[in-house]
């Protein structure tokens, strides 16, 4: 189970970096829970897909230095990474982009 969990998480982040939203979203369950940074909790794949659509419109991000950690048995897992990116268009409540890198 540990190798399977590690592979699932690695495929998830690889799909994110490839901007392959179809694969990225296919790796989630319908009842996924997303705690948005400095925001509300959203539940469901449709809500997460809408969030990602907005993010991809306003930001171009890549994850680097990805480390996947899985507990023995695979019941718990986590990933650590560095976000690299660019602010592309004005996101609600934020100033206009001016070449900012993330």
Image (spheres, rainbow, N blue to C red):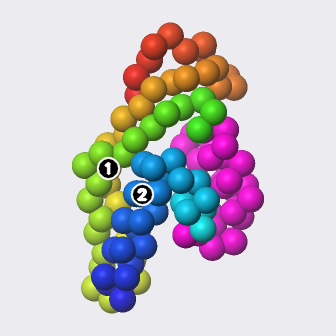
Residue closer to the observer: 95 or 38: 95
Q: Is residue 44 above or below residue 41?
A: below
- Cα–Cα gap, marks 1 and 2: 10 Å
For residue 93, side relative to residue 27 (left or right): right
Which residue is painted at 36% across and 74% down in the image?
A: 7
| Quadrant, the N terminus | bottom left
Position of residue 37 in the picture relative to residue 78 (left or right): right
Marks 1,2: beta carbons within 8 A: yes
Q: Residue at x 28, y 69 (%)?
A: 69
92 and 85: which one is in front? 85
User: Residue 67, located in which quarter of the rendered image?
Assistant: bottom left
- How far across and how far down the image is residue 38, in percent? 57, 40
Q: Is residue 39 left or right of residue 16?
A: right
Q: Earlier in the sequence, mark 1 or mark 2?
A: 2
Image: 9 above or below 56: below
Give the label, 1 or 2, closer to the camera: 2
Q: Is residue 96 magenta?
A: no
Q: Report the residue at 65% width, 25% height from top.
A: 91
- For the question of whether residue 34 can be seen, the reply is no
Question: Could you tell me which residue is drawn at 63 percent across and 33 percent down?
Answer: 57
Residue that lies at the very extreme toward the right in this rendered image: 46
- Report the span colored magenta: 27-55
Q: Which residue in the rendered view is the most extreme toward the top?
A: 98
Q: Where does residue 22 sit, x and y in percent of width and height?
A: 61, 59
Determine whether the residue tagged by mark 1 lies in a helix, strand or loop. Answer: strand
Residue highlighted by disc 1? 81
The reply to whether residue 7 is visible in this rendering is yes
Residue 52 coordinates in the image, percent (x, y): 62, 46
**Which numbered marker is on residue 13?**
2
Q: Tag 2: Cα neighbours inside 10 Å, few (<14), some, or many (≥20)?
A: many
């Amino acid at each position: 189970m540990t190798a399977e969990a590690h592979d699932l998480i690695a495929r998830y982040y690889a799909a994110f970096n490839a901007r392959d939203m179809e694969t990225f979203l296919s790796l989630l369950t319908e009842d996924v829970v997303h705690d948005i940074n400095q925001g509300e909790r959203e539940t469901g794949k449709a809500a997460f897909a809408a969030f990602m659509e907005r993010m991809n419109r306003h930001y171009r991000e890549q994850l680097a230095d990805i480390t996947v950690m899985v507990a023995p048995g695979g019941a718990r897992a986590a990933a650590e990474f560095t976000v690299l990116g660019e602010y592309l268009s004005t996101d609600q409540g934020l100033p206009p982009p001016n070449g900012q890198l993330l």
